[in-house]
Amino acid sequence: MSARAGIVVTGTEVLTGRIQDRNGPWLADRLLELGIDLAHVTICGDRSEDMQAQLRFMAGQGVDLVVTSGGLGPTADDLTMEIVARFCGRELVLDPALESRIAEILAPLNRRWRNLDPEAILASNRKQALTPSGAVPLQPVGTAPGAVVTPRDGLGPTVVVLPGPPRELHEMWQEAVGTEEFKRAVAGRTSYEQHTLRLFGIPESEIAETLRMAEGSIEGLDALEVTTCLRRGEVEVVVRNEPAAADAYEALEALIAERHERTLYSTDGARVDDQVAELLAGRRIAVGESCTGGLMAARLTERPGASVYVAGGVTAYSNEAKIDLLGVDRALIAAHGAVSPEVADAMADGALERFEADTAVAITGITCAGRRSGRTAPCWRAT
């Protein structure tokens, strides 16, 4: 069994959804990279009793490491360091070196805003220089230091205390991982391999049936941790295993490839977006859209670096827009209707010409709002 960890994300603003949690997923990836088994991720508000309850829960689950994020600011509701000190049986003490470092960080602020009271600011931020006795302080990236705190009696998990702002947390994580206290806490870690298979055009129940078949035909399947997720119309199958279970994974991949030959499009984790970008290498694509309202162009430009191969797009929702912006012949629309393969072809030709591209996609159809009597809404595309 590998070393196990838990993540406690603090902050009422995160708990209530006003701010999206970006730290939990990021830390989960970093723990996986280190071969540490993540057992739980919890979110709690800025309440002392709730934060203590999360730490007790993690300890009760037998984790070796707890990583917290948030609650290290100078205000009254920033309680994390105090709660962690109490949980680990340690007193909070003032670290003069940290206090001096925080004063250096605040000096430019005091020079810029001369109407501020420097002494009041330092007094407020002195709270951030309080660390649990015997802890390893982590140097602040903003004004909030972190810490690696071991339990005083040697029983229970080591706690890594990190700030809430993602940029600060990312930089401080590297320092925390390098401490001897961190290394001792996760000494039992192992290495994991992770594989991602992607399929398009099948329900999740189809994969569930394949996995049931695998249970009776693949030796060592129980050594694989398999999760499935439906995302953007795709079924994502993620398999994690230790190196010794490589044969079982290869057998599972072969079974999925055999049963879903027409829908399995990625065995290396590459997304449709990545594969489209690869196919467009050296080309320029333009888009003419009607019923999708710009969704195709948005998907194409969602990937970093898309400007290399995306020339542009037009959302021509009305017939007049198709005529004026994409050069579709008015007579063609009158003869075949706006939702027709002929008009889709003309929209693609117009996108090619106006953006001087060598590849084009055009889409025209009837949206859900425009359907009649529950019949399937027609949609045409041209490339």
Image (tube, rainbow, N blue to C red):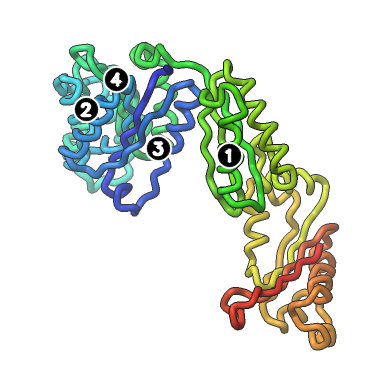
Residue 237: mark in rendering: 1
Instruction: Please tell me in which quadrant of the rendered image residue 87 appears.
Output: top left
Mark 2 vs mark 3, CA separation in Å: 18 Å
Q: Which amino acid does label 4 sit on?
A: Thr
Q: Which amino acid does label 1 sit on?
A: Val
Taking the image as shown, residue 301 lies to the left or right of residue 63, namely right
What secondary structure is found at the residue carrying circle 2?
A: helix
For marks 2 and 1 on the same chain, the one whose residue lies earlier in the sequence: 2
Q: Which amino acid does label 3 sit on?
A: Gly
Residue 84: mark in rendering: 2
Q: Please rate how many residues cluster around mark 3, counting C-alpha atoms within 10 Å: few if below 14, some from 14 to 19, many from 20.
A: some
What secondary structure is found at the residue carrying circle 4?
A: strand
What secondary structure is found at the residue carrying circle 3?
A: helix
Q: Please rate how many residues cluster around mark 2, counting C-alpha atoms within 10 Å: few if below 14, some from 14 to 19, many from 20.
A: many
Q: Please rate how many residues cluster around mark 1, counting C-alpha atoms within 10 Å: few if below 14, some from 14 to 19, many from 20.
A: many
Q: Which amino acid does label 2 sit on?
A: Val
Task: Examine the rendered structure and indicate whether residue 86 appears above or below residue 374.
Answer: above
Residue at horizontal 58 percent and vertical 39 percent from the top:
237
Mark 2 vs mark 4, CA separation in Å: 10 Å
- Work out whether residue 350 or residue 27 is closer to the camera in this orientation and state it: 27
- Work out whether residue 96 or residue 308 is closer to the camera in this orientation and state it: 308
Whether residue 11 can be seen here: yes
Mark 2 vs mark 1, CA separation in Å: 37 Å
Instruction: Please tell me in which quadrant of the rendered image residue 345 appears.
Output: bottom right
What secondary structure is found at the residue carrying circle 1?
A: strand
For marks 1 and 3 on the same chain, the one whose residue lies earlier in the sequence: 3
Q: Mark 4 points at which residue?
A: 158
